[in-house]
Image (spheres, rainbow, N blue to C red):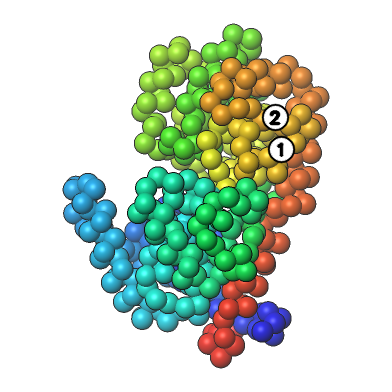
């Protein structure tokens, strides 16, 4: 079936995903605003979803009993999801993050089924224990199409080990809205709010404060940077289980005066914060295609990120950014210092980075690819009339 035959019709799309994720929000908002009827099954939400989206909250049982509550809730979610699907009657279902939501979508028995891998659900989670490996393999086996939201070559070994049928794999990215994330969003009121003068350079991180993103390495690099450039400021956005630990670490290292933990930044405000900074840092241990990195590149920040397979397609070391070894905070510090002392190099990195994102990760282009995948699977007579 050619997508063009039905590409002007609306679909009833059901997502099952982490509702608190900005990536989920951007994805479902995009398709809702394209005129599709969008349903989201999740157990937790963040503000900012389009009003047209139909939200279906899963029930979490015995929230104070851990890990018992996790397994009780998971069992209940299976039945709850099946009941919801019988009411929604979607044209297609997409489970985001295979280990949990992809598995739950597969257990529903619904088809056509798409499962979407974000990165760690293929690269990290299946290695943690046999149960997670089983849930991942089960979801992949039951799926009609597997979306890898990262370059496939970075997970070739894991894909082979999990026995994925390569004919079912499609690769694309969530992409970046280049009109939204661009250097013209620079806003001096951001610096005023943070109490940072125009002459003081800003290094920013926008990763979740969780072990996998290893923001600890950035904090440990700060004293070395300040020894050379005492006016530098570090802005750490995001929340997570390590936020108190990281605050205490900064305090113990004596860098609290130059480090601000600002918590979650709203979608509307994020481009302003990025464009008001000078250098973007990610010290993550693992990633898929990091939208946080791509958004920073689109805003013309000079990137300094870990030398992992997920970052290598985007950063040509020494040409549009720097790569540094995982957990090597001394090398990270040296790269930051170099860029802060060499403004022309920093600006050159910044401009090249935006060009790379514009060419290879523009949101409209990537979402049209995903829409075509949906249309390929959906029968014409089941599509909603526009």
Q: Element under label 1?
A: loop
Q: Is residue 197 left or right of residue 62?
A: right
Q: Element under label 2?
A: strand
Residue 352 found in image quarter: top right
> Is residue 99 positioned above or below 227 on the image?
below
Residue 337 numbered tag: none
- Percent across and percent down for residue 132 are 38, 53
Is the C-beta separation of discs 2 and 1 under 8 Å? yes
**Residue drawn at x 54%, y 85% as measured from the top left:** 384
Can you see residue 34? no
Q: What is the quadrant of the C terminus in the image? A: bottom right
**Residue drawn at x 25%, y 56% as measured from the top left:** 71
Query: Is the residue marked by circle 1 packed among few (<14), some (14-19), or many (20+) residues within 10 Å?
Result: many
- Percent across and percent down for residue 361 are 70, 53
Q: Most extreme residue toward the top, as rendered?
A: 227
Q: Earlier in the sequence, mark 2 or mark 1?
A: 1
**Residue with the mark numbered 1:** 315
> Is residue 320 positioned above or below 59 on the image?
above
**Foreground pick, 203 / 148:** 148
Q: What is the quadrant of the N terminus in the image? A: bottom right
Number of numbered markers: 2
> Is residue 95 positioned above or below 184 on the image?
below
**Residue with the mark numbered 2:** 322
**Residue drawn at x 49%, y 36% as measured from the top left:** 213
**Foreground pick, 225 / 55:** 225
Spatial CA distance of label 2 from label 1 is 7 Å
Q: Is residue 242 left or right of residue 197?
A: left
Q: Most extreme residue toward the bottom, as rendered?
A: 381
Query: Is the residue marked by circle 2 packed among few (<14), some (14-19), or many (20+) residues within 10 Å?
Result: many
**Foreground pick, 118 / 58:** 118
- Percent across and percent down for residue 114 are 52, 69
């Amino acid at each position: 079936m050619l997508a063009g035959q039905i590409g002007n019709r609306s679909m009833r799309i059901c997502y099952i995903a982490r509702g608190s994720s900005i990536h989920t929000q951007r994805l479902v908002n995009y398709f809702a605003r394209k005129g599709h009827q969008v349903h989201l099954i999740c157990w937790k939400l963040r503000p900012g979803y389009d009003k047209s989206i139909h939200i279906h909250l899963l029930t979490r049982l015995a929230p104070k009993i851990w890990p018992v509550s996790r397994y009780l809730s998971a069992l209940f979610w299976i039945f709850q999801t099946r009941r919801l699907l019988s009411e929604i009657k979607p044209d297609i279902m997409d489970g985001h993050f295979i280990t949990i939501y992809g598995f739950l979508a597969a257990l529903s028995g619904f088809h056509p089924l798409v499962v979407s891998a974000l990165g760690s659900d293929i690269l990290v989670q299946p290695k943690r224990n046999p149960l997670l490996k089983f849930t991942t393999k089960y979801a992949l086996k039951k799926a009609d199409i597997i979306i890898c939201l990262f370059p496939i070559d970075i997970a070739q070994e894991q894909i082979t080990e999990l026995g994925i049928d390569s004919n079912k794999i499609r690769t694309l990215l969530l992409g970046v809205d280049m009109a939204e994330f661009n250097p013209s969003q620079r806003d001096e009121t951001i610096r005023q709010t943070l109490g940072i003068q125009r002459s003081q350079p800003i290094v920013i991180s926008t990763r979740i404060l969780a072990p996998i993103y290893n923001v600890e390495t950035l904090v440990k690099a700060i004293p070395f940077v300040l020894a050379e450039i005492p006016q530098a400021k570090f802005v750490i956005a995001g929340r997570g289980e390590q936020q108190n630990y990281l605050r205490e670490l900064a305090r113990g290292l004596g860098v609290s005066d130059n480090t601000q933990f600002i918590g979650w930044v709203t979608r509307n405000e994020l481009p302003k914060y990025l464009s008001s900074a000078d250098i973007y840092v990610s010290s993550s241990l693992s990633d898929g295609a990091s939208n946080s990195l791509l958004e920073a590149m689109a805003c013309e920040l000079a990137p300094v990120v870990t030398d992992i397979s997920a970052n290598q397609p985007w950063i040509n070391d020494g040409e549009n950014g720097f790569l540094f070894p995982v957990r090597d905070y001394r090398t990270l510090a040296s790269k930051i210092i170099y860029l802060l002392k060499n403004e022309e190099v920093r600006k050159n990195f910044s401009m090249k980075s935006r060009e790379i994102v514009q060419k290879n990760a523009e949101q409209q282009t990537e979402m049209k690819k995903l829409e075509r995948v949906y249309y390929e699977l959906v029968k014409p007579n089941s599509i909603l009339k526009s």
